[in-house]
Image: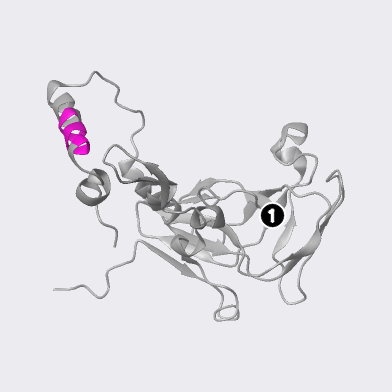
Amino acid sequence: MFNIFKRPVMEFYCHPEHYGVIPEPKPAAKFVADWFKKIPPTLPERDVFGAKSLTAKKCMPMLDAMTLGYVIPLQADLHVITNEDKTRIEVTNPPGMKICEFHDIKQLGERTAPGFPTTPLKFINHWVIKTKPGYSTMVMPLVNSFGNHFTCLSGLVDTDRYPKEINFPAAWHTPNFDDTIPAGTPLVVVFPIKRSDIPSKPTIRAITQKEYKTIDDIKKMQDSRRHVYTQELREPRK
């Protein structure tokens, strides 16, 4: 029988005064980078099967990585000002909510800090991430997303034991900036990781004859037809 009380692997919640007001976390699939979306699916050149060559647009491992998890967005408009050499940065929080402050650059190594000499930002997150027992949350910048004004730093948090808001330190990149970063701008992508599935150290060994045969069989399949990984070996996503 279906258990209606089964705990979800990951859930997000916020204070009632913010619920329905601030942008909600959304699937990462809604934030695939523009450069990737603009790539044509094929090239005029022909592949070994005589068909048009495929581009990265058809690379399922790349797309699967870019659509994994959930994006936590900036929760209100934020105005940022920087000067030419990025030695000065100012932020103006909206009147109704604090969404950004600063870290001390010494915390990130000062002269070797990412984004130096700009003071690191700290984005204030009002969403609590809660995972079921045994699961942590990986927090990282959006995969294969380039050319952004800032990059949040990655972290792994045991959100089953720490159901509290997690803030996001970030390095600022753009000089001579004087504009508003709009609410809803992607900050980070998060996804659950089962801690018991992460080995303390990798197993390193020589390949077996059976494994070598598997590799050879896959190569023969790929030599006989297109899309072997995408259509035959890749597990369909829900």
Is most of the magenta stretch helix, strand or loop? helix
Identify the residue shown where x is 70% and y is 53%: 149
Residue 219 part of the magenta-drawn span: yes
Q: Quadrant of the N terminus?
A: bottom left
Q: In the drawing, does residue 188 fall left or right of residue 11?
A: right
Q: Residue 178 appears in which quarter of the rendering?
A: bottom right
| Residue type marked 1 | Lys
Q: Is residue 109 above or below residue 37?
A: above
**Residue appearing at x 17%, y 33% in the figure:** 220
Residue 161, visible in the rendered structure: no
Q: Is residue 19 above or below residue 32?
A: below
> Does residue 216 appear in the picture of this structure?
yes
The picture quadrant where one finds residue 23 is bottom right
Q: Residue furthest top?
A: 206
Q: Position of residue 43 (x, y in %)?
A: 43, 47
Whole-percent x, y for residue 211 in the image: 17, 27
Front residue (pair 218, 42): 42
Q: Write down the region rendered in magenta.
A: 216-223
The residue located at (69%, 65%) in the rendering is: 99
Q: Residues within 10 Å of mark 1 (few under 14, many from 20)?
A: some
The residue lying toward the viewer, choosing from 137 and 77, is 77
Residue on which disc 1 sits: 122
Q: Position of residue 144 (x, y in %)?
A: 52, 47
Q: From what the image shows, is residue 14 above or below residue 104? A: below
Q: Determine whether, in the image, residue 227 is placed left or right of residue 78.
A: left
Q: Is residue 146 left or right of residue 3?
A: right
Left or right: residue 176 compared with residue 165: right
Local SS, label 1 = strand
